[in-house]
Image (cartoon, grey):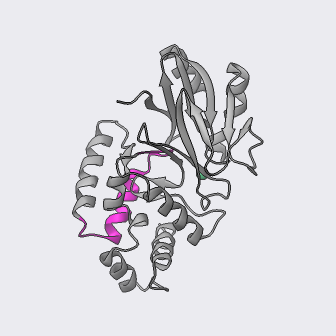
């Protein structure tokens, strides 16, 4: 039984700001825009007690100052962050109390160097920002592909039932790419069908679970023989290793 209610607040064209609530209190994760958050707080009659930041990009932090001013809430975020400093600087292994529930901080550099994730085993909840997406992963802007794969491997090792609360609705495009990389994957074919139905109804495809992601996300499936074969056939596999598979898939995806 979960103590926290977690729901998406859509922002910009495809961001999700995650609203965490318990009783009349709330946290939000990665608020890029203030207005939808303030509207949600008012609509549900909630007091904002804190903000969790995963990384410095503007679409995740743009509303931090405005929400702090409006509510007086505290902000937790990573060290050495271009958008910081935050009220509570949190490092790998630190525990953040979110409305009475412990969340562990996991350092996941790659998309940005300051990127962290927040994980609660009790709530089966992972807030992973732009590191792991449903069916995909973030672009590697600041770190290396090796760093990004190591970060994804850390997340993949969490309990399979963990719900993946990522920060964007990129699912259908991600899964279409995944199908080019691993066309025979039955779990992937089923996920495309299932997620397309959800989007047709205007529903979010997020969260998935880590078990789902391990079954169809090509950026966690560097040991899939079919993926290796596809990348090799296309002449993209420069190095036949886990890092080589990840890098080749990531480069291919970057090309669109
Ligand atoms: Zn980002």
Does residue 130 show up magenta in the picture? no
233 or 129, nearer to the observer: 129
Res. 62 visible in picture: no
Looking at the rendered image, the quarter that the N terminus falls into is: top left
Q: Residue at x 73, y 31 (%)?
A: 65
- Residue 141, by quadrant, is bottom right
Give above or below for 248 relative to 98. Answer: below
Give above or below for 1 relative to 211. Answer: above
Give above or below for 45 relative to 243. Answer: above
Q: Residue at x 63, y 28 (%)?
A: 50
Q: Where does the magenta region start and end?
A: 163-185
Q: Residue at x 33, y 82 (%)?
A: 229
Residue 235 locus on image (x, y percent)? 43, 86
Side of 124 where 127 appears, left or right: right
**Which residue lies most toward the top here?**
45
Q: How many marks?
A: 0
Give above or below for 118 relative to 8. Answer: below
Side of 184 where 106 appears, left or right: right
Residue 224 locus on image (x, y percent)? 33, 74
Res. 196 visible in picture: yes
């Amino acid at each position: 039984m979960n103590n926290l209610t977690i729901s998406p607040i859509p922002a910009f064209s495809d961001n999700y700001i995650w609203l965490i609530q318990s009783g009349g209190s709330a946290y939000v994760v990665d608020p890029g825009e203030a207005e939808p958050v303030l509207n949600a707080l008012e609509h549900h009659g909630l007091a904002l007690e804190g903000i969790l930041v995963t990384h410095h990009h503007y679409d995740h932090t743009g509303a931090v100052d405005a929400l702090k001013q409006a509510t007086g809430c505290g902000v937790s975020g990573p060290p050495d962050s271009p958008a910081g400093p935050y009220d509570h600087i949190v490092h790998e292994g630190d525990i953040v109390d979110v409305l009475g529930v412990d969340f562990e901080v996991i350092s996941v550099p790659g998309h940005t160097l300051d990127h962290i994730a927040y994980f609660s085993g009790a709530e089966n909840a992972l807030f992973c920002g732009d590191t792991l997406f449903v069916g995909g992963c973030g672009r590697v802007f600041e770190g290396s592909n090796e760093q990004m794969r190591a970060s994804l491997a850390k997340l993949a090792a969490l309990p399979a039932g963990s719900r993946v609360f990522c920060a964007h609705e990129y699912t259908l495009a991600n899964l279409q790419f995944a199908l080019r990389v691993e066309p025979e994957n039955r779990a992937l074919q089923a996920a495309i069908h299932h997620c397309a139905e959800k989007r047709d109804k205007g529903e979010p495809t997020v969260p998935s679970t880590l078990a789902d992601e391990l079954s169809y996300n090509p950026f966690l499936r560097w040991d899939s023989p079919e993926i290796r074969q596809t990348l090799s056939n296309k002449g993209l596999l420069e190095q036949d290793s886990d890092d080589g598979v990840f890098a080749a898939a990531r480069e291919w995806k970057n090309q669109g």
